[in-house]
């Protein structure tokens, strides 16, 4: 399970250091793709394969399903960790997430999220106000504290 928050920078070539705690689980090759809320999602190979199977099982006759599948698969890229613990984030993915320099990597249970620092800060400020309301809805789903 991925957890924690790490601040790093992307260099001029688009390379990002992956924290060692995350690399231990991810291995040397893994998948980076467009995420939700303007961030990137990172999956180890086992999680990615399970996610792909779920996407394949979705009926393509529904437009929302097709759009959902395209969102995640069109921009997906297998990346490899170099000797310095870095990956190269493809330009299209950096552009999608508005990543230029400062980033925040966030553990999110079965995947990692990569955020531009600006988007992360903005999201945190906006969502913190509604966290109590969200927690109440989670209780309705059986997740209580």
Image (spheres, rainbow, N blue to C red):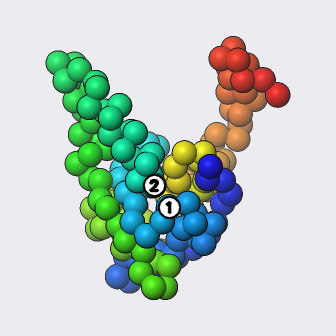
Q: Is residue 34 left or right of residue 6?
A: left
The residue singled out by tag 1 in the image is 26
**Residue drawn where x is 72% and y is 23% of the image:** 143
Question: Which secondary structure, mark 2?
Answer: loop
Decide: is 39 above or below 36.
below
Give the distance between the C-alpha atoms of the residues marked 1 and 2, in whole angstroms.
Answer: 5 Å
Check the image and name the residue furthest to the top: 140
The residue singled out by tag 2 in the image is 44
Decide: is 80 above or below 141.
below
Mark 1 surroundings within 10 Å by alpha-carbon count, few (fewer than 14), some (14 through 19), many (20 or more)? many
Residue 136 spot, x, y in % from top left: 73, 21
On the rendered image, what quadrant is the C terminus found in? top right
Question: Which secondary structure, mark 1?
Answer: helix
Check the image and name the residue furthest to the left: 61
Q: Are marks 1 and 2 in contact (CB under 8 Å)?
A: yes
Q: Is residue 81 left or right of residue 111?
A: left
Mark 2 surroundings within 10 Å by alpha-carbon count, few (fewer than 14), some (14 through 19), many (20 or more)? many
**Residue drawn where x is 41% and y is 81% of the image:** 82
> Visible in this render: residue 95?
no
- The first of marks 1 and 2 along the sequence is 1
Residue 127 spot, x, y in % from top left: 64, 40
**Residue drawn where x is 31% and y is 44% of the image:** 72
Decide: is 144 above or below 120.
above
Residue 4 spot, x, y in % from top left: 68, 57
């Amino acid at each position: 399970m991925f957890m924690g928050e790490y601040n790093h920078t992307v260099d001029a070539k688009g390379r990002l250091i992956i924290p060692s705690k995350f690399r231990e689980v991810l291995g040397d090759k893994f998948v980076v793709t467009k995420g939700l809320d303007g961030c990137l999602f990172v999956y180890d190979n086992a999680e990615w394969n399970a996610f792909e199977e779920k996407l394949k099982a979705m009926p393509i006759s529904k437009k929302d399903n097709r759009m959902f599948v395209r969102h995640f698969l069109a921009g997906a890229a297998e990346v490899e960790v170099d000797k310095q613990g870095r990956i190269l984030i493809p330009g299209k993915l950096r552009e999608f997430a508005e990543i230029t320099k400062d980033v925040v990597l966030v553990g999110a249970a079965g995947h990692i999220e990569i955020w531009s620092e600006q988007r992360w800060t903005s999201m945190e400020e906006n969502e913190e106000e509604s966290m109590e309301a969200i927690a109440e809805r989670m209780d309705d789903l059986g997740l209580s504290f």
